[in-house]
C-alpha cells in the first residue's frame, strides 16, 4: 500500500527510497519511446495533421516510423542517461517524501492518513519537492530528446558545459513555473485517485478473488495516470516549450521555432498561432505514456517495496 497505513508497519525511509529509485529506473526504460514522441509533438509549431504540408509529425505510428528511418531506433532513447538520473532521483525523493508526509499527518493532525484530501495534498507536496530537486535533469533530458541530426550536444557533460557557458545557470530551471503549477495537482490526483481506485477495487472484488494484487496495482495506477494527465496536460506542454528556449538552432530541422519570454507569453502565442487545440498537442502519446508510466510506477514500487521489506 502506498502511503502511511496505521494498521500496517511503517515503511522505512531507506526502503521507500530504494523502491522508488528501482521503480523509476525500470519504468523509464520501458516508456522512453513514447516520451520522445510526446516531446516531438509538443514542440512542433505546425498542426499535427497529414493535411498540413509543413508538418513533420502527424501521428504516433507515422512519427515512430519517421524517427526510426531518419535517426535510427536509438533515437527513441535519446537523452536516456539524464532521463534515468531524473527518474531514479525523482522516484526516491517523491516516495520518501510521500511516506513521511502521510505519517506526519497521522501523528500530528486529526486527519485520516488514508483520506482522498490527505493523499492529494501530500502527493502534490512530495512531487513539488522532487521537482525542485531534479529540474536541471529534466531540462537536460528535454534538450537531448528534442535535438535532431547533427547533434548539438555530444554527451551529458558537453551539454552541461555548453548550456552553462552560453545561457547561464538559470537555464537549467527553464519552465519551472508551469512545472510546479502543474505537478502539484497532477501528482496529487495520481496518489489520491490511486488510493480511491484501490478502495473501489476492494469493495467490488470479493475477498476470495483478490489473488492478483500486482495486476490491481497496475490497472489502478494506469487509470489514475490517465485521469491526472488529462486534467493538467497544457502545463506540461508549456514546460517543454520553455525548456528548449535558446536551443532554436537544433530545432530548425523539425519545422518552425518560437522564442517565448515566459509562461504567460508562451500561452498567449500558442492561442494566437495554434488555437486552443495547441494546448493539447501530443496528448495521445502523452496519455499512453501516462497510463504505462503511472501504472508501472506504482506496480514496481509496491513490488520492490514488498521485496525490500521482506529482507
Image (cartoon, rainbow, N blue to C red):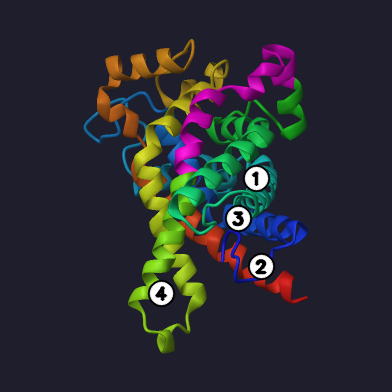
Viewer-nearest residue: 121 or 252: 121
Q: Estimate the x, y position of residue 148 in percent, counting from the top left.
A: 54, 31
User: Where's the C terminus, which quadrant?
Assistant: bottom right
SS type, badge 3: helix
69 part of magenta stretch:
no
Closer-to-camera residue (11/138): 11
Left/right placement of residue 63 relative to residue 16 reads left
Q: State the extent of the magenta-drawn residues as a range.
A: 162-187
| Residue, disc 2 | 304
CA gap between label 4 and label 3 equals 23 Å
Q: Crowding near pointer 4: few (<14 within 10 Å), some, many (20+)?
A: some
Q: Does 3 appear above or below 50?
A: below
The residue at the point 33 percent across, 29 percent down is: 279
Which element type, helix, strand or loop, lies under badge 4? helix
Q: Is residue 168 magenta?
A: yes
Which type of secondary structure does the marked residue at label 1 adopt?
A: helix
Residue at which label 3 appears: 106
Q: Is residue 70 above or below residue 14?
A: above
User: Can you identify the residue that label 1 sits on?
Assistant: 90
Residue at disc 2, secondary structure? helix
For the residues labelled 1 and 2, say whether their Cβ atoms are less than 8 Å apart. no
Amino acid at each position: 500500500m502506498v502511503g502511511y497505513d496505521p494498521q500496517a508497519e511503517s515503511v522505512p525511509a531507506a526502503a521507500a527510497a530504494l523502491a522508488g529509485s528501482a521503480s523509476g529506473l525500470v519504468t523509464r526504460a520501458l516508456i522512453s519511446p513514447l516520451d520522445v514522441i510526446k516531446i516531438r509533438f509538443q514542440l512542433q509549431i505546425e498542426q499535427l495533421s497529414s493535411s498540413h504540408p509543413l508538418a513533420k509529425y502527424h501521428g504516433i505510428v507515422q512519427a515512430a516510423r519517421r524517427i526510426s528511418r531518419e535517426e535510427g531506433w536509438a533515437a527513441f532513447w535519446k537523452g536516456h542517461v539524464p532521463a534515468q538520473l531524473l527518474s531514479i532521483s525523482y522516484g526516491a525523493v517523491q516516495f520518501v517524501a510521500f511516506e513521511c508526509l502521510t505519517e506526519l499527518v497521522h501523528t500530528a493532525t486529526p486527519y485520516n492518513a488514508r483520506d482522498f484530501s490527505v493523499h492529494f495534498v501530500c502527493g502534490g507536496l512530495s512531487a513539488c519537492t522532487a521537482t525542485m530537486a531534479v529540474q536541471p535533469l529534466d531540462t537536460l533530458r528535454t534538450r537531448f530528446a528534442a535535438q535532431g541530426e547533427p547533434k548539438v550536444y555530444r554527451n551529458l557533460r558537453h551539454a552541461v558545459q555548453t548550456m552553462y557557458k552560453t545561457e547561464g545557470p538559470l537555464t537549467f530551471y527553464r519552465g519551472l513555473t508551469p512545472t510546479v503549477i502543474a505537478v502539484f495537482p497532477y501528482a496529487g490526483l495520481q496518489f489520491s485517485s490511486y488510493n480511491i481506485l484501490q478502495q473501489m477495487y476492494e469493495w467490488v472484488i470479493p475477498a476470495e478473488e483478490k489473488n492478483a494484487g500486482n495486476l490491481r496495482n497496475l490497472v489502478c495506477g494506469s487509470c489514475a495516470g490517465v485521469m491526472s494527465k488529462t486534467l493538467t496536460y497544457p502545463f506540461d506542454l508549456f514546460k517543454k516549450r520553455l525548456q528548449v528556449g535558446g536551443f532554436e538552432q537544433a530545432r530548425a530541422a523539425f519545422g518552425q521555432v518560437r522564442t517565448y519570454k515566459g509562461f504567460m507569453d508562451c500561452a498567449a502565442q500558442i492561442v494566437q498561432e495554434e488555437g486552443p487545440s495547441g494546448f493539447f498537442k501530443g496528448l495521445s502519446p502523452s496519455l499512453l505514456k501516462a497510463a504505462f508510466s503511472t501504472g508501472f510506477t506504482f506496480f514496481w514500487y509496491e513490488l520492490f517495496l514488498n521485496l525490500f521489506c521482506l529482507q
